[in-house]
Image (cartoon, coloured by chain):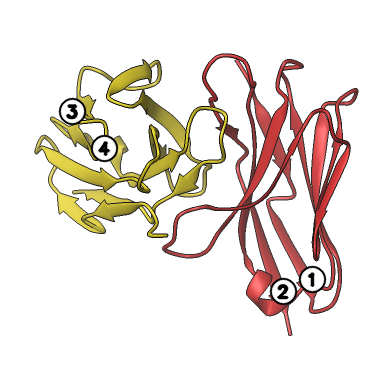
Amino acid sequence: EAGVAQSPRYKIIEKRQSVAFWCNPISGHATLYWYQQILGQGPKLLIQFQNNGVVDDSQLPKDRFSAERLKGVDSTLKIQPAKLEDSAVYLCASSLGDRQPQHFGDGTRLSIL
Amino acid sequence: GENVEQHPSTLSVQEGDSAVIKCTYSDSASNYFPWYKQELGKGPQLIIDIRSNVGEKKDQRIAVTLNKTAKHFSLHITETQPEDSAVYFCAASKDTGFQKLVFGTGTRLLVSP
C-alpha cells in the first residue's frame, strides 16, 4: 500500500512570504493530521481532520496558519505570512479512523530566511 | 494537558547489547502509548504500541512495558543492530474523544558495530 505522500520535500522562503504544503493520505484513511516538528523536538499536533471536518485545531496559530481538506482526501496547509520561528519540518499523518495507528509521511522541511 | 518526558536524550550501545528508553506521562487518563522510529530525513515510523489494558507487548527484538500506577512506559530493544540507529519517540494519548498524540522529546540511539 502506498504511504502518505507530501510535497514539496523542501522549501526555502523569506520571512513574511507565504507557503503551502500538500498531503495525500493513505487511501481509505478518514483521519488526517498535520504536525510541526522543530529541530530536536517531537512532533506537535497542529490540526486534525475527520473526513473533511476539523476536529481539533487548538494548537494551530490561526492568525497565520490555515488548513483545508475540502473533499475529505488530500489536504493543504498554508502559512501566511511566515515568521522565522516557523522553520521546521511539517509532517502529515493519516489513520483509518480515530483511535487507529497514525502513519506519517516524510514531511516538508521549511526554512525561513 | 498531557506532558511526556523521555530519557535519555542520547544512548550509545555496542552491537548486540540491549537498549532501554523510558518515558513518563502526566495525565492518568492516557491509555494509548505508541513508539516511533525516525531516521534522518524520514517521517516517524510506528514500531510498536500498547494500550493500558496490557502490561507488556513484544514484537521480535522489540518490547514495550507499561506501569500505569507509576505513569511510565519503556521501550526495550534486544540484540541491537547498526540499522537500529535512529531517533526514537514515545507518545501518549487518551482513547476518549479524538486521539491526540503528545510526543516526548526523542532519544537518539547510536549502535556501533
- Residue under label 4, please give it: A73
Q: Which residue lies furthest to the left in this view?
A: A17
Residue A26: x percent and y percent? 37, 48
Counting every numbered tag in the picture gives: 4
Do the residues at pointers 1 and 4 share their chain?
no
Which label belongs to residue A70? Answer: 3
Q: Mark 4 lies on which chain?
A: A
Q: Which of marks 3 and 2 is in front?
A: 3
- Residue under label 1, please give it: B13
Residue A14: x percent and y percent? 12, 45
Q: Which of marks 1 and 3 is in front?
A: 3
The secondary element bearing badge 3 is classed as loop
Which label belongs to residue A81? Answer: none
Per the model, the C-alpha gap separating discs 3 and 2 is 44 Å
Which amino acid type is marked by label 3? Leu
> 10 Å neighbourhood of mark 2: few (<14), some, or many (≥20)?
many
Looking at the image, do the residues carrying marks 1 and 2 touch, with CB atoms under 8 Å apart?
A: yes
Chain shown in red:
B
Q: Which of marks 1 and 2 is nearer the N terminus?
A: 1
Q: Mark 3 lies on which chain?
A: A
Q: Mark 1 lies on which chain?
A: B
Image point (82%, 33%), residue name: B72
Colour representing chain A: yellow
Q: In which quarter of the image is residue B47?
A: bottom right
Image point (74%, 85%), residue name: B113
Q: Is residue B47 above or below residue A83?
A: below
Q: Is residue B44 above or below residue B32?
A: below
